[in-house]
Image: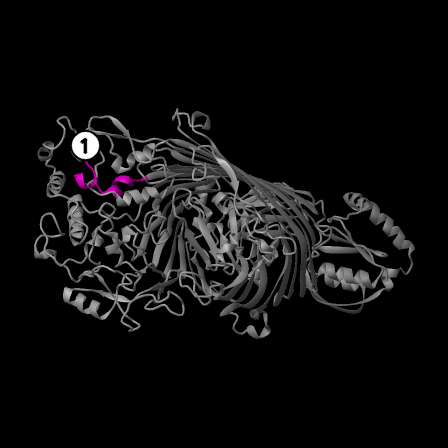
Amino acid sequence: MKKNVVYDLGGMNICLLVKILLKMKLTFLLILLSVVQLLAFNGYSQSTRLTVNLENVRVEKVLLEIEEQSNLFFIYNREAVDVNRKVNVSYSNMGITEILEDLFKDTDVTFEILESHIVLKSKSGQNDRKKITGVVTDVYNKPLPGVSVIVKGTTIGITTNVDGKYSLDNVPGNSTLVFSFVGMKPQEISVAGKTIINVVLEEKTIGIEEVVAVGYGVQKKVNLTGAVDVIDNKQIENRQSPTVSQLLQGQSPGLTFSIGSYGFQPGAQMEINIRGIGSLNGGSPYVLIDGIPGDMDRLNPDDIKSISVLKDAAASAIYGARAPYGVILITTKSGAENEKINVTYSGSVSVATPQNLPEMLNSATHARVINEAGANRGGRPFKDEIIDRMYAYINGDIDYLRQFTVPDAIYFETMPRSNGTWGFNQYGNANYDWFDEYYGSAINQKHNISLKGGTQATSYYFSAGYLSQESVLNYGEDTFERMNVMGKINTAISDWWDFNYQVRFMKSNRVIPNMDNQGSYDLIFHQIARTMPMNAKYDGYGNIMIQSKIPWVNDAGTDNIETTENWHTFATEIRPLKGWKINADFAYKSVDYFRSDQELTVYDHLVDQSLIISGNTNPSSIQQFHQSNNYWTTNIYTSYELSINDLHNFTILGGTQYEVNNGRSLNAIKNNLIVPDVLSLQTATGEASVTEGLTHWATQGYFGRLSYNYNEKYLAEANIRRDGTSRFRDGKRWGIFPSVSIGWNINKERFWSSIEKYINALKIRGSWGALGNQNVASYQDLELIPLHSSPLNWIFNFGQTRPVGYTGTPALVSPDLSWETVTTKNLGVNMAFLDSRLQADFDLFERNTTNMIGPALAQPGVLGASLPRENNATLRTRGWEFALKWKQTISNDFSYFVDINLYDSKSVVTKYLNPTGILSNWYAGKEQGEIWGYTAHDLYRTQEEVDKYVEAVDLSYLWGGIWRPGDLKYEDITGDGVVDNGSNTLGDHGDLSIIGNSTPHYQFGVSAGLTFKNFDFSMIWKGIAKRDIFFSGNDNIFWGFRNWNQSSLFPNHLDYFRDQPGDKYTGLYEGDENINIDAYWPRPYIHNGENNKNRIPSTRYLQNAAYARLQNVQLGYNLPRNILSKLHLQKLRIYASGENLLTISKLPKGIDPVAVSSRWGAGKTYGADRIVSLGLIITY
């Protein structure tokens, strides 16, 4: 039978003639068709008999079925006739009039049969206009002021008043009203046959109907088969952390965080992993911002709408080689169609203070304790008369001190020495707690303003943000500033074609104080920790002493790092047919990184007030480094959605991606600045040293996805990606990576109905997928010849000073180096109970990284070249995740929620080239984080005990010198009479055993909150339930004692072994009170070798690094809506917020359990500040 056309007057393919006739109230058409009908005696329509049997279908489907069975076709306007209404019909051999009367009964739709044309129309008529009034309330019958009421498809609208009432004139009789309000579910209601419309708006809730972002699109949560977690912006808004990575801590199970050597410095970025370590060569998640790769920590957190975390291969496989270790999808805020313009300002001012500072001993106690350590070995460094001066200074006896200094002295913290310098270290008599001196407080601020709205065809969002953060150090310039600007415009060129443009601009500036010409930020904290309390801040004349390190921090120059990022994204979506979308986007990013490092000469004052150059600060120098990166990417993909009888639902997607990155850098250094106030390469007289760097890489991929669900009950999805990368050589550049996943919504089964009121949802899902990892160093496929430049004085022994260029040995290249392959299996369960107030999610996963790049097989040294790495290692990670969420509204005035997440994993190397099984390297069977050490529980208490044990057990491997009472007693667990590590191999490890594991285990997060009337309260906890740490011998914040002038002594170190009486100048206490043979710490020395014999990894000093931290707590107040309406505001909220207010940890004070260590030792880094802030949010 001939296929007929439906003339849809509200759709895209509208006949112009019919449009005109419709505007003339169909007069001409009706007259014409009436004449035809009168002339058509016993016409076709009167004789046609039809049989139609359909269940749970739209009215439109019934009309199409009638057209398929006949030569009839329908004319109607979608705005006037609701053809999306679901119906069940059963018509057997019935006439068209009977069918249509039944189909449209109890509606305002009438029909007129004009032979083979049937006109459907609304009784109210398209041009009938009327007045609509009503009241909008919430579910508790409380009026809602400020609700937007708009006639759909027009600009006609109004907002409800303080009583929730509205009155709208001139409303078309066949139109639809749209009711919308922030935080509420929008509603659309037809006005047909109504003059009073009262509406109840419900609060938006997260549930199985939620739509979440996935690769190249969105999916309903109920249909997800991969492991995906969603973080709403409410979980990160109004926080004072400067970067998104810090804000995500504790928000999702499986997200793990670590901080670099500089700790929580201003603007600190955290390294994020999803589900633990992915490869021994490193691996971080792929971050996309609105579908384009980006750096989340350069984004303004206030611009974020939601974050999706794709954890398994099934969820992330569509992104291919860039995403073997998961994906983080960030969706930014946008305007909405027909949204009134609103402007939001949010700002806060905060005060930051250090939260975990140790307390130094006073100078006299420090000196006496060090003298006792020196008496054990090393000699007493502090003379009696110097300690007397310390007591005098502590007691304020200036008259006593005056006799030792210059006549016109105004400070008495140090005395002149015979060599013309001021005394320091063992000659100082001040009393400073340098932690208290260096650390203070900082006032920080952030401000954001945004504008968003939309018309019928265009929506827009613009924002600008400014962040200023200072460190809590009292000295030096240590700051971070960031400015963000963002603009988004989405416009509908037609109802089937959209265009989107987005621009983002970010500029940040980090200023770091230099130290002693060494350019190391964490060196500051090392110097603070090892500066002894008797060192003076001021000499006798009030000049700041160099030994305080303050001149180095203040005057040695700064390291200025300026980063500028520009993003431009163009995207379009075309919808040629229902369910068919064609998407294309192009993004361009430029990043300029400029670093200016000035190292200036610092001077110290002698007693005669003359100046000398201090330490390593000569010659002065300037270094400038500029790096420019240009990146572009494009995606072209198409998708088609097909539903058969609303039961069989298919989505097919296919596309391609291409990306290119080019980088260039230039580094120049010159010494001898002649004008320190003009910091430029031109004002330095030294010879310039210039180096250049070039980088390039590119990837290309083709991807496809097929999704199917049967009535949202049985779910299946398959992905495939073919990726190519420039990082490997020809023949190894391409790989194919598939994934499959299935799911079963058991609660959709009929047998579930009896328990559905208790268990509202139950979904089981499983997935398998393989991805390639191309995140390896570039140019490993090229046989590069290194170029060097050096004076080569050892060859040209004739005073050669100018550099000579020469080449090194060419690198060897492996012809087989290729992809690491990451295969992931996942089994998950999602459940909801008690009207979905309680939701539980559980996942088991296994990830295997095969063909991992590892070391090459050793070759004879005569080869003369370094060996290329090979694909010869394997890593397995197994773990689980658990999340529990409870949300309940008790009444109109009170609601609360509690979210708990818990995660753990274990990574084990299953293959690695280590033929001898050396313990210090990876080997098959080694678990990440293993700590090998000796068994030791006690200290020797007497010399008799020492002599007896040393006679029976050979300890010379550990320490060839003398063992004394108070030293650590290492046990001979093998019973062979020797304590050693054997061959230090897996097969022969002597008395070594695995005593702990440094990998964090049982990571958890807890979020809770409540609202009471206009008040709200929330808090976030995060922590680790199990982690072991053994601090090395150089970690003197932990151990306390080191060399006499580098010891960091705090009250917790005073429980050390003492077996001799003390006196006024040696020992913690005088007389026998000093004796302490049941001590925790071993006998101290001021000889590193003696100290370190007691600091070999052992069970006694293995530390529990578990912790719980109150990450954030907030208390807010929202101005009542009746007041807001009088002020013409949509929202006004004031709040107080606290970050890192409490940390529960067994680690010593001074060691942050998150920022444990740096290059200089444990605790010598910037710990997390305690931050208290006040904030304001206003929406106009």
Q: Nearer the viewer, residue 19 or 808?
A: 808
The kind of secondary structure element at disc 1 is: loop
Is 1059 on the left or on the right of 869, as rendered?
left
Colouring scheme applied when the structure was drawn: one colour
Q: Magenta part of the protein: which range?
A: 420-441
Judging by the rendered image, the residue that carries numbered circle 1 is 419
At a point 20% along the width and 55% down the height, the residue shown is 1084
Report if residue 423 lies within the magenta region: yes
Q: Amino acid at mark 1?
A: Asn
Residue 24's image quarter? Answer: top right
Q: Position of residue 340 (x, y in %)?
A: 57, 41
At a point 11% along the width and 33% down the height, the residue shown is 404
Q: Position of residue 628 (x, y in %)?
A: 54, 38
Query: Is residue 973 at all visible to an observer of this figure?
Result: yes
Report if residue 281 lies within the magenta region: no
User: Can you say which quadrant of the picture contains the N terminus?
Assistant: bottom right
Q: Predominant secondary structure in magenta? A: loop
